[in-house]
Amino acid sequence: MRTAVVIGTGLIGTSAALALSGRGVTVHLVDHDPAQAHTAAALGAGTDQAPDGPVDLAIVAVPPAHVAATLADVIGRGAARAYIDVASVKGGPMRELAALGVDLSGYIGTHPMAGKERSGPLAASADLFEGRPWVLTPTRDTDTEVLNLALELIAYCRAVPVVMEADAHDRAVALVSHTPQLVSSMVAARLGDADETAVRLCGQGIRDVTRIAASDPRMWLDILSANPGPVADVLSGIAADLDETVQALRALQSGEESRRKGGAEGIEDVLRRGNAGRGRVPGKHGAAPAVYETVAVLISDRPGELARIFADAGQAGVNIEDVRIEHATGQQAGLVQLMVEPKAVPALTAELRDRGWALRPQ
């Protein structure tokens, strides 16, 4: 691949362009808002000048509702040797293209499983896709050269290719991406009218659950409008669980011992099923989830403190597998939770204590 055009210079399009430009590919940037394409170009993602002729790969990075029309236009103009889109929904656009009579041999639907709460070119980064799954949805009509160019793009972005059927992809992302966004937003919405005293009690749990609720509502409306059925199916199952959980909690309020016992069993059931589901989420490097111990360290909010604690852990010969920071409300301090392998805990705690860190029990 020597040349490419990216149509749509938001987070995903600009990030892909940055990755390609960094590998020496000449990237042309197109957007319905020329100022956004100019911003992406200024970041080093490519040029906002039109190509002189057909490019090797056209990457369509527009909202799902506009994917089919955009692809039909560029394919009709012969703008590239191969065409892909990066929308988060695959079945609908593919059927729209077929209905328009577009030759699908030069096209393959793709979806990089990466993103941020922020959108737009200023949020983009060349390493956004590194280590992340990138779904490919080829059909029997897909030309081998097109598949190879798509795989080359994924390799340049350091992502991991995953081949799926389009509708199976849409059902999967409804479960692991689209529904979590709605549930996160619903929980965060409860905070809107909450008493200020309650809001001040927010800890890491509510921050974890509501993190993605900061996402752009307009972008998510586009995504959910393109995949409403599968998302509604998942939410229907959650609604049934919610109803059973509400009934179990009401039973716990009962003065009748048998009802309280049944309520406790219902709550325990949903919590245990949650444990089992969480255990299926892939862990580090895609492997089975590992069980880590947490070492909690009190840390001040001063420059260099995180670097110092990581360096001290390195001196102990301990690899930090994961890290979380829980900030103290109203104080310039917080707890850093260092996740490590259980066998590393004694060496890490001893080293940190020797170096003056204040450890906290978990």
Image: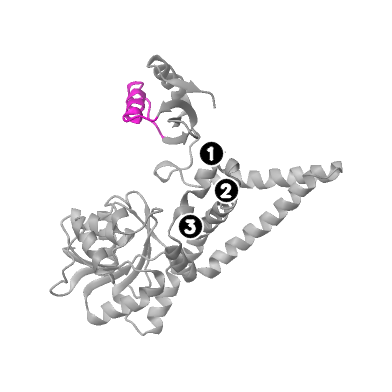
Whether label 2 touches label 1, CB < 8 Å: no
Identify the amino acid type marked 3.
Ser
Q: Quadrant of residue 347?
A: top left
Q: Which residue is mark 1?
A: 203
Kindly report the distance in space between the C-alpha atoms of the residues bearing marks 2 and 1.
Answer: 23 Å
Identify the amino acid type marked 1.
Gly
Whether label 2 touches label 3, CB < 8 Å: no
Q: Position of residue 166 (x, y in %)?
A: 44, 68
Can the viewer see residue 340 in this picture?
Answer: no
Q: Which residue is mark 2?
A: 277
Coloring applied to the structure: one colour
Residue at position x 77%, y 46% in the image: 263
Can the viewer see residue 146 in this picture?
Answer: yes
Q: Position of residue 60 (x, y in %)?
A: 31, 69
Chain part drawn in magenta = 301-321
Examine the rendered structure and indicate whether residue 262 appears above or below residue 137. above
Q: Position of residue 23 (x, y in %)?
A: 18, 54
Examine the rendered structure and indicate whether residue 87 appears above or below residue 312. below
Kindly report the distance in space between the C-alpha atoms of the residues bearing marks 1 and 3.
Answer: 23 Å
Q: Is residue 107 left or right of residue 174?
A: left
Q: Earlier in the sequence, mark 1 or mark 3?
A: 3
- Mark 3 lies on a secondary structure that is helix
Q: Earlier in the sequence, mark 2 or mark 3?
A: 3
Kindly report which numbered mark, 2 or 1, lies closer to the viewer in this rendering.
Answer: 1
Identify the amino acid type marked 2.
Gly
- Mark 1 lies on a secondary structure that is loop
Say which mark, if any, is on residue 177.
3
Would you say residue 77 sits in the magenta stretch? no
Would you say residue 303 sits in the magenta stretch? yes
